[in-house]
Amino acid sequence: MADYLLPCSCGRKLTVNTGQAGDSVNCQCGARIEVPTARRLVHLEKAAEATEPVWDARSGVIFLGIFMLAAATFAGLTMQLFRQSPPSAATLSPADMFDLWIYQSGGPNRNENVQAIVQNSVQANSRNRSIDNWTWSILILGFVGAMVISIGRILPRRTELK
């Protein structure tokens, strides 16, 4: 898109592009200037090509949102890769399963081996609760990141003043 210089009554020239045709822009002096239609915009003086990209608040907000979203994605993927599942019935030997059944039913044959199985199960459940809390934190971070990107997208673009 080509950039054009839109003159203000104060003498400044605002840089506008064809995407802003029909809109209005504000000058530093406080005047609100209507940008001509695309057909009339081409009759204005062309702006010099910018050699370096403009980094403004809008770009910073969008970058922050993308960074937050990327961090949440990375953390979520890392958690999924290193998640430890609690011991399931399929991983217990028949003897351990029988001991656990005896223990759960309150039978007289409680031994230390069953205590270790139960302790491992409790620790695994505690780890999973902790992981669930981290999962919610990551989801919230990702949601906030997406919202920051959305806010950055609706912020007005910076117009160059000359």
Image: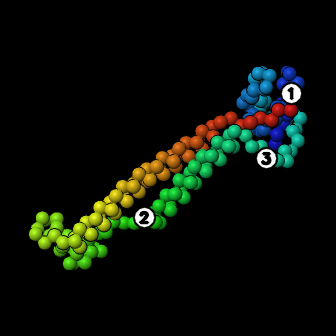
Q: Nearer the viewer, mark 2 or mark 3?
A: 2
* Residue with the mark numbered 2: 83
- How far apart in space, not on screen, are marks 2 and 1 (Cα)? 60 Å
Residue at 84% in and 45% down: 50
Q: Nearer the viewer, mark 2 or mark 1?
A: 2
Residue 101 in view here: no
Q: Amino acid at mark 2?
A: Arg
In the image: residue 108, left or right of residue 144: left
- How far apart in space, not on screen, are marks 2 and 3 (Cα)? 42 Å
> Which of the pair 141/38 is nearer the observer?
141
Quadrant position of residue 94 = bottom left
Q: Amino acid at mark 1?
A: Arg
Residue 22 in view here: yes
* Element class at badge 3: loop
* Residue with the mark numbered 3: 53
* Element class at badge 1: loop
Figure check: 70 above or below 90: above
Answer few, some or many: residues within 10 Å of disc 3's Cα (few below 14, many 20 plus, some between 14 and 19).
few
* Element class at badge 2: loop
